[in-house]
Amino acid sequence: MDVLLIAGLWLDGSAWDDVASALRSLGHRPVPLTLPGQGDGSASATLDDQVAAVLGAVDVASGKPVVVGHSAACSLAWLAADGRPDKISKVVLIGGFPAADGKPYADFFELRDGVMSFPGWDPFDGPDSADLDEEARRAFAATAIPVPGDVATGVVRLTDERRFDVPVVVICPEFTPAQAEEWINAGDVPELAKAKHLDLVDLDSGHWPMHTRPAELARLLAAAADTA
């Protein structure tokens, strides 16, 4: 099965290299996406450009793919479910949750010169980065791709209620399934509160398991695809 892989902020499709290799060995076809403005050399991309790229990948996929979103890109994966509810077999969300309709995509940090650059490791101190050694942190920071401002501040628009019929798996790395369930039940994640088929899966890692637990992450993604 095709597994579309969408990395979070500051990352391009190469972030999935180790996961993709493991997924292939497990019998699936990984399709890592490099989004407009995050790896293609364009700093003028918008959120709509990124959504269009994801929907285009869904349209050319073989069969009904699994769409995987990491971190902020959980919203992109959910926007794919909204835009193509009949063409996606499952959505997998890693370390994040989809933004609600009308909310900004990822306005988490200050924009400078029209982009949101990687802010350094201080905001991610603790469980997010605990499993990244100094070498991995330096490599991440050195290759981090500034996010275009019109992506970060773009407004999420959700229009098709059929998205709630698409099965969802939340992989919980730096937080636990119990915490995720508590947040959903408290109304903090309104989109997932309405999902009709929701599974929460634990993964003992920090926020970037594609770097620190690629084999384990690939097995979870393969299991999600096998049951799609």
Image: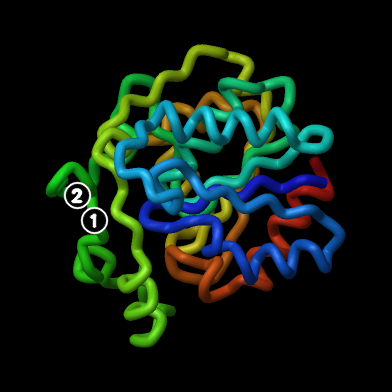
Looking at the image, residue 18 sits to the left or right of residue 148; the answer is: right
Name the residue: 83% across, 49% down.
226
Looking at the image, residue 193 sits to the left or right of residue 88; the answer is: left
Q: Name the residue under label 1.
A: 117
In this rendering, which labeled residue sits more in front, label 1 or label 2? 1
Q: Where is residue 61 in the image (x, y as percent from the top left)?
A: 75, 37
Given residues 66 and 151, the one toward you in this image is: 151
Name the residue: 68% across, 50% down.
31
Q: Is there a contact, CB below 8 Å, between mark 1 and mark 2?
A: yes
Given residues 190 and 106, the one toward you in this image is: 106
Tag count in the figure? 2
Q: Which amino acid does label 2 sit on?
A: Phe
Name the residue: 44% across, 59% down.
175
Which scheme is used to colour this image of the protein? rainbow
The numbered disc on residue 109 is 2
The numbered disc on residue 13 is none
Q: Position of residue 217 (x, y in %)?
A: 64, 65
Q: What residue type is labelled 1?
A: Ser
Q: Quadrant of the C terminus?
A: top right
Real-space CA distance between mark 1 and mark 2, rounded to the nearest whole angstrom: 8 Å
Q: Position of residue 92 (x, y in %)?
A: 62, 45
198 over 163 or under it: above or below: below
- Residue 178, visible in the rendered structure: no
Instruction: Give the SS element for disc 2.
Output: loop
Q: Where is residue 144 in the image (x, y as percent from the top left)?
A: 34, 63
Name the residue: 49% across, 42% down.
74
194 over 203 or under it: above or below: above
